[in-house]
Image (cartoon, rainbow, N blue to C red):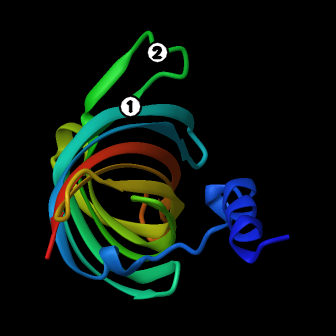
Amino acid sequence: MNCRILGAVIAIVLPATAQAQDASAWSGFNFGLQASKGNGSQTYLPDGSYDLVGNGFGGFVGYMMANGAWAYGGELAYAGTDYYEAAIDSSVEYPEWNFNHTLDLKARVGYAVGRALVYGVLGYGFSEYEMGSETSVTDIKGAIFGLGVDYLVSDRMFVGAEVLSRDIGLSDSDEPFDANLTTITLRVGMKF
């Protein structure tokens, strides 16, 4: 069989996903805007549990390096938020008990698939918690992890979505609590 014909047959038979991927398009600095929606639960000891619901809006800046099909780097993201407490049955809301913002330090590792980058996140998040009518503000922190995908719509612009799980809490207080919050974030950014 002619080598050219054999090569053509192999090229047709091999799926596109089996061909080598290149993450170099994702290397360099990036920045952008993000909007998120979150929900979860918060447990006071020994008072009980409450739902957490709300939204956030902010921005991010990061840097990525590429090695073959893999990209890795870090990101700093900030969002003003209104994640507030509600009764478990959602019949009563407590908007004055809320998380005012989130500040996330994230390590990202991704794999390029065509124009998309599928990535995992591991990091640490900080938030400011406002404790009701007492206007007492407390800083809380904890681990964050999740998954996301960014997609290049041009050589420099990308859109994406990210799901993060936050395990944050406060132990050194008269009212200790643990909070688990899941956020779904839509992102739009530029790379350079």
Q: Is residue 179 left or right of residue 48?
A: left
The quadrant the N terminus occupies is bottom right
Residue 94 sits in which quadrant? top left
- Residue, far front: 2
- Classify 191 as above or below 70: above
In depth, the one of 148 and 80 nearer the eye is 148
Residue at image coords 46%, 15%: 90
Looking at the rendered structure, the secondary structure element under dot 2 is loop
Taking the image as shown, residue 134 lies to the left or right of residue 112, namely: left
Residue bearing mark 1: 53
Look at the numbered discs 1 and 2 and tell me whether their residues touch, using CB distance below 8 Å: yes
Q: Looking at the figure, which quarter contains the C terminus?
A: bottom left
What is the secondary structure assignment of the residue under circle 1?
strand
Residue 90 circle label: 2
| Residue 96: percent from left, percent from top | 22, 34
Amino acid type, residue under disc 2 in the picture: Ser
Closer to viewer: mark 1 or mark 2: 1
Q: Is residue 94 above or below residue 100?
A: above
Disc 1 versus disc 2: distance between alpha carbons? 10 Å
